Image: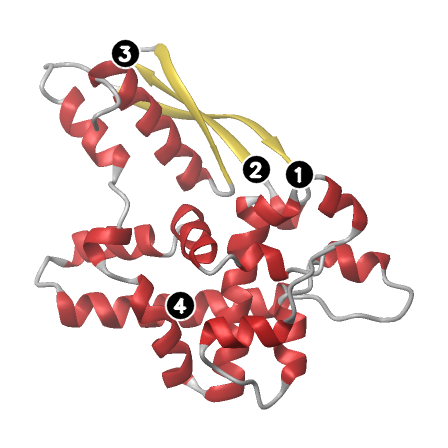
């Protein structure tokens, strides 16, 4: 179990909750609620709301701080709100150490599991939004959204550009596996070049798995510098 208190987390956030229950719920994983002997609310509904708040703040930030065309802004926003980016953000404030986890999830490394921690980050955004309004949530989010620091490369686009240098070359992405419950699925995608498998990737969405597969393919074809 975590030895971190929610009061310590408030100090990290530089915010004091008027309704402390919101923070407690945001830090409560479904596994904890399922193992509790009394009815306990978990963070899945907050995660849903936080995802939308984050998307709005990220879109607003990019609109006002970048002159790039719509297609590039869309890719940049997707990068900023990806599981990989949210996990990095959460690690910056050691969010995993504040989570309330069930015994099995605790023993299974839930505090450092990207899917668990990134979901909690979204739930925390929702808790801040509900407790203090959009500007409170925005003040928390914006320091993470510095383009050069957080925007991940669009590996699929990079791979496509590389392949197009060879006339007639063709890429194909195929879902080769799915695992986990409906609310927390993991997809495995294989990328093939001219019908030959090059690499595979895993992610919580097909798009995320495709990005990871493209990244692995780029490293095989050009080296890890990309």
Q: From the image, state whether disc 3 or disc 4 is nearer to you.
A: 4
Residue position for label 1: 180
Task: Say above or below: 75 vs 164.
Answer: below
Q: Earlier in the sequence, mark 3 or mark 4?
A: 4
Q: Residues within 10 Å of mark 1 (few under 14, many from 20)?
A: few
Which quadrant is home to the N terminus?
Answer: bottom right
**Residue at the bottom extreme, as displayed:** 18
Mark 2 element type: strand
Q: Residue at x 64, y 83 (%)?
A: 20
Which quadrant is home to the C terminus?
Answer: top left
Mark 3 element type: loop
- Contact, CB < 8 Å: mark 3 with mark 2? no
State the mark number for residue 186.
2
Left/right placement of residue 95 relative to residue 206 reads right
Alpha carbon separation for disc pair 3 and 4: 38 Å
Task: Say above or below: 45 vs 204.
Answer: below
Q: Residue at x 21, y 35 (%)?
A: 157
Residue position for label 4: 54
Residue 127, image quadrant: bottom right
Alpha carbon separation for disc pair 1 and 4: 25 Å
Task: Say above or below: 76 vs 66.
Answer: above
Q: Residue at x 28, y 62 (%)?
A: 145
Residue position for label 3: 194
Q: Earlier in the sequence, mark 1 or mark 4?
A: 4
Left/right placement of residue 33 relative to residue 159 reads right
Q: Can you give x and y, in whole percent of width and height, for residue 29 in the image?
A: 69, 59
Q: Earlier in the sequence, mark 3 or mark 1?
A: 1
- Contact, CB < 8 Å: mark 2 with mark 1? yes
Q: Residues within 10 Å of mark 4 (few under 14, many from 20)?
A: many
Q: Earlier in the sequence, mark 4 or mark 2?
A: 4
Q: How many marks?
A: 4
């Amino acid at each position: 179990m975590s030895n971190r208190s929610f009061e310590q987390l408030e100090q990290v956030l530089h915010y004091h909750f008027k309704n402390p229950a919101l923070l407690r719920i945001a830090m409560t994983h479904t596994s904890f609620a399922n193992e509790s002997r009394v009815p306990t609310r978990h963070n899945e509904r907050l995660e849903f709301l936080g995802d939308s708040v984050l998307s709005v703040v990220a879109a607003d930030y990019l609109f006002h701080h970048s002159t790039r065309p719509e297609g590039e802004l869309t890719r940049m926003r997707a990068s900023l709100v990806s599981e990989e980016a949210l996990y990095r953000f959460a690690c910056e404030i050691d969010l995993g150490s504040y989570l309330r986890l069930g015994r099995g999830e605790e023993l299974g490394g839930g505090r450092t599991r990207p899917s668990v921690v990134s979901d909690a980050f979204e739930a925390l955004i929702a808790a801040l939004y509900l407790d203090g309004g959009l500007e409170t949530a925005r003040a928390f989010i914006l320091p993470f959204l510095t383009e050069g620091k957080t925007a991940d490369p669009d590996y699929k686009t990079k791979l496509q550009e590389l392949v197009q240098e060879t006339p007639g070359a063709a890429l194909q992405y195929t879902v080769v596996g799915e695992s986990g419950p409906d609310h927390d699925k993991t997809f495995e995608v294989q990328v093939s070049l001219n019908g030959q498998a090059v690499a595979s990737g895993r992610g919580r969405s097909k798009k995320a798995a495709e990005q990871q597969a493209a990244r692995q393919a780029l490293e095989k074809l050009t080296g890890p510098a990309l």
